[in-house]
Amino acid sequence: MKAHPQLAIILIAHLAIAASVSGQDPAAASSLAPEQFAILPWGGTPADPAVLADIKACGFNLAGFVSPDGLDAVAAAGLKAIVSGLHVDDSTAGLDEAEVARRVKALTEKTASHPATYGYYLRDEPTAALYPALAKWSAAVRAAAPKALPYINLFPIYASAGGLGVPTYEEYLEQFVKTVKPAFISYDNYSLMDDGTLRDGYFQNLEAVRAAALRHDLPFWNIVLSNAHFHYAEPTDGGLNFQMYTTLAYGARGISYFTYFAPAIGNYRLAPIDQFGNKTRTWDMLRRVNLQIHKLAPIYLTLKSVNVFHHPNVPSGCRGMDSSKFLSQLHGGDLMAGEFEGPEGAQFVLVVNKNLHRSTPFGLQFKSSGPVGMVNSYSGHKQPWAGENIWLAPGQGMLLFVQPEKK
């Protein structure tokens, strides 16, 4: 196909502006540490150098849950890991503090100083009744390995109240923070359905976790889908973009994908790695999503979440455009926007196309005057927001900003 000369001129101009604004080498690769923003393939991971190299190449900075004897291979791949070997269940919840400390010490003495150790797996989806035991185990981990994080993942908002162990999801979150005293809040939510719809509760879950995280000054992680099973949808570019960009718009500091390896049960399919150990089309789609996080992170991590709103369709329990701190107008489709304060008073808005199936052009107007720029999610550079950048693919987001003029 012959290139259009005007398009080539526009692209060259944008590259020149981007280089001058950012001062970055376009070819430089970002190295995003999990301490800054965690990207985790949820599940157990073998200590196979080839497997770990592919995980790294897919844009992850954590290897998953790894046995202690696999840490050398994890470090060689340039990754960190959540170490397995501690699990708080009915058989261990009632152990006294001395026995808990003994078991934690036996594992951490061998692993805490290892450069690949990021944290220790304790529990997935506990009820509130397990919080006192988890507090005991978490305290033992923090005492024995102060630089490592105890890993606990919470139920989604659509779990039954009986499953949570408390009357409301908000109470489930609040009791977790006050009892366990975690370093971060992690939860899972699988809401992309095989009939093309979004399950009720997806945005309400983000709202509740964001509110708890802000209230207690904690980062939060979201676990989303990267395979099809039950009545969940097969992965698509739009679905993966949607899950990632909506998570960023709410101010998350971590994302995890369930699962990287397809389980050899039921109707699980199209995980990034199939049941035979081969890459599926999902692997390439997930890499594209993860690499966008790496490119956005140097700027995104400097921002403070101050508001999230939806327009024109506002889910129950969410805010509409009348709550916007920075925008007077937003139009073009079924959109949402996370608003962030940046350095030196800069105003940032992450606009997301919530439609999973159709692209949309969009427009906006900041309340503050000044030229509108964007952060290119493929280069990480700041550049003018113009031309074909008014288009958003299904699920795609765009980080825009204005530097208010000084009076």
Image (tube, helix red, strand yellow):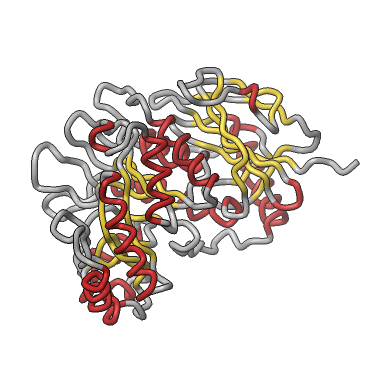
Q: Residue at x 60, y 36 (%)?
A: 307
Q: As displayed, is residue 194 above or below residue 173?
A: above
Q: As displayed, is residue 54 above or below residue 246?
A: below
In this view, the residue farthest toward the left is 265
In this view, the residue farthest toward the top is 312
Position in image of residue 262 (x %, y %) = 17, 48
Q: Residue at x 66, y 27 (%)?
A: 364
Position in image of residue 200 (x %, y %) = 35, 24
Query: Is residue 302 found left or right of 128 in the rendered image?
Result: right
In this view, the residue farthest toward the right is 407
Total numbered circles: 0
Residue 79 visible to the viewer = no
Which quadrant of the rendered structure holds the C terminus?
top right
Residue 390 visible to the viewer = yes
Determine the image quadrant of residue 365: top right
- Between residues 184 and 232, which one lies in front from this camera angle? 184
Q: Residue at x 31, y 36 (%)?
A: 166
- Between residues 252 and 172, which one lies in front from this camera angle? 172
- Between residues 63 and 356, which one lies in front from this camera angle? 63
Position in image of residue 206 (x %, y %) = 44, 36
Q: Residue at x 22, y 58 (%)?
A: 88
